[in-house]
Image (spheres, rainbow, N blue to C red):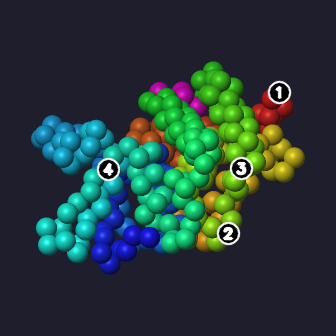
Amino acid sequence: MLSTSTYHIHITYFPVRARCEPVLLILADSGTQFEYEEIPQVKWVEMKKAGQVTPAMFPYGGVPILRVTDKSSKQRSEFLLGETSAILSYLEEIVTLPGTTLNKDLPLQTRARTQMIKEASLFFTNRVWGLSVEEDWLAPPSRDKIWKAITVRYLRNTEAALGELQKEMRVVPEEMGPLTALHATVAAAITFITQVFPSVKRGLVPGGNFPLCGQLWIAVMTRPRIVAYWKEHAIAEKAWTITEYGTAEWIAREAAKYDSPSLLAKL
């Protein structure tokens, strides 16, 4: 496990949840000290115009960005990393307690399957968040398309993939066990889904359509350090995307108008 007395962990992102949600889940759960910097969208635009968003400071010209500084070095060497998937893979190893089985220690097929689920979860959320530029993205007919063509497909495939993976390893994290990138990405995706479609929660219970997804989600989101961090920093009240139609209030309002108990009836 990386020592915070020697290294400083710094995350840079917008003041929204989106792509940084799984990163925060892993960091908060680890108990590792880290600094979280939020750059308002207006400032980000100004930084880009001023030529401050360079590959040397922002790999691939976006956020989130992970910066790890070696404080023991006289030159204070820094390691920069962009892209959520890469950041998660890195954090998954450096914040894990010694003696823990790491993803890289698993059989190839198991590693590949966990990566498949992780990448699919990130792709799903990014795809849906991209629709939030439109005012009516959570109203019919867009809402119906998001549910039937995108969300149901993600849930079905994730449930099936977790079921296959469970034959090789434990997919629901133990109370005192490590939190992995797979756990964090699936939990982040399902948290978002339950806010857009509250009625889906009935399908996440034992006997429901997606019980493994539900067990994993609850196991992650009830971990004490995550509960404490989410409460202290009011994460649940934050917007999901940078658009005015991606706020927690907007999503809840649209759900109140359009969510239906019959959501799972035709699956």
> Mark 4 falls on what kind of element?
strand
Nearer-N-terminus badge (1/4):
4
Residue at the top extreme of this rendering: 141
| Left or right, residue 35 beside residue 250 | left
Amino acid bearing label 3 = Glu
Name the residue located 75 percent from the left edge and 43 percent from the top edge.
163
Residue 266: which numbered mark, if any? Answer: 1
Mark 4–mark 2 distance (CA, rounded to whole Å): 29 Å
Name the residue located 37 percent from the left edge and 74 percent from the top edge.
3
The residue wearing badge 2 is 175
Amino acid bearing label 1 = Lys
Residue 161: which numbered mark, if any? Answer: none
Amino acid bearing label 2 = Glu
Considering depth in this image, is 227 or 161 the residue closer to the camera? 161
Q: Which residues are magenta?
A: 134-138
Is residue 135 found inside the magenta-colored segment of the image? yes
Mark 1–mark 4 distance (CA, rounded to whole Å): 43 Å
Considering depth in this image, is 165 or 64 the residue closer to the camera? 165
Name the residue located 43 percent from the left edge and 63 percent from the top edge.
94
Q: Which of label 3 and label 1 is nearer to you? A: 3
Where 101 sits versus 139, above or below?
Answer: below
Residue 14: x and y in percent read 35, 49
> Mark 2 falls on what kind of element?
loop
